[in-house]
Image (cartoon, helix red, strand yellow):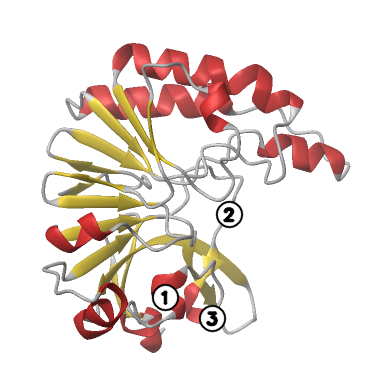
Amino acid sequence: MKFITNEPALVLDGTLVVGDLHLGIETEFYKSGFMIPSNIKKIGDRILKMAMENNCKKLILLGDVKHDYHGVSWQEEREIPKFLKKISKRLEVHVTLGNHDGNLRQLAPKKVHIHPTSGFRSGTYFFNHGQSWPGKEFLKTDLIFLGHSHPAIEFRDSLGFRSIEPCWLRCKLDRKKIQDKYKERGVTKEAVVVPAFNPLVGGLPVNRGEGELGPMMKNKVIRLTECDAYLLDGTYLGKVKSL
């Protein structure tokens, strides 16, 4: 597993893994009175560049590919099919559906592999957006990758200046709670929570108790305060509870 320095992306056995693209978020800004040009093309070019530089043939999108929660915006209907068609010409694309991905199947080319919200297994790894319990197959894997939470760290200086930086989280799993949930033992010991890929999404400071907490966090399978936090440049910050 290789974390790409200064990018919210990782490489795993020749596969590029990213989460929370939220394509089409510009429409929400427009409705609020802010004119922001679409960055969907830039996101696609950035993904393809990283895939080429790291010799990746496969791309896994950890859900929330689109942004509109209630349906499909005019921007998503026009631009997401082009985005996925362009990416899938170069890479084998797999998507595990997130809570913003309603109607994504209708927008995606047939060659894009769409997996249910329960996630999917690939070798010794499992991929799930994070808003729902992973399928039982995850019990047979070594590591689970999650999106959804948009993890970040808030920094404040002595003058009160505030900045928020996206971060990675590496988290131990409570295996007893897993057994209580699934009624069988599993081998999975660790989860990696992936920061949001789209810079317009921003991040939710986990050291201030913020974040989109899925069922694994709400039910203490993952104890957020016990997770290790890393900045995108690789700096280890320590446990969330100490920040």
Q: Residue at x 35, y 47 (%)?
A: 6
Tell me where residue 164 sits by quadrant: bottom right
Please state the horizontal and vertical placement of residue 104, each as a whole percent of the image. 55, 31
For the residues carrying marks 1 and 2, which lies nearer the camera in this image? 1
Identified by mark 3, the residue type is: Gly
- Residue 150's mark? none
SS label for mark 3: loop
- Packing grade of label 2 (10 A; few <14, some 14-19, many >=20) is some
Amino acid type, mark 2: Gly
Picture disc at residue 209: 3
Q: Position of residue 166 (x, y in %)?
A: 45, 59
Which residue is tagged 1? 217
Q: Going from the N terminus, do you reach mark 1 or mark 2 first?
A: 2
Q: Nearer the viewer, residue 116 or 162?
A: 116
Q: CA distance from mark 1 to mark 3?
A: 12 Å
Horizontal side of 125 relative to 116 (left or right) equals left
Q: Position of residue 222 (x, y in %)?
A: 33, 77
Dot 2 lies on which element? loop
**Quadrant occupied by the C terminus:** bottom left
**Residue at 46%, 44% in the rendered image:** 63
**Quick one: 21 or 50, which is closer to the camera?**
21
- The dot on residue 202 is 2
Query: Which amino acid does the dot numbered 1 rest on?
Result: Met
- Residue 63 is left or right of residue 74, and the answer is left
Nearest-to-viewer mark from 3 and 2: 3
Q: From the viewer's perspective, is residue 53 above or below residue 236?
A: above
Residue shown at 57% from the left, 41% from the top: 22
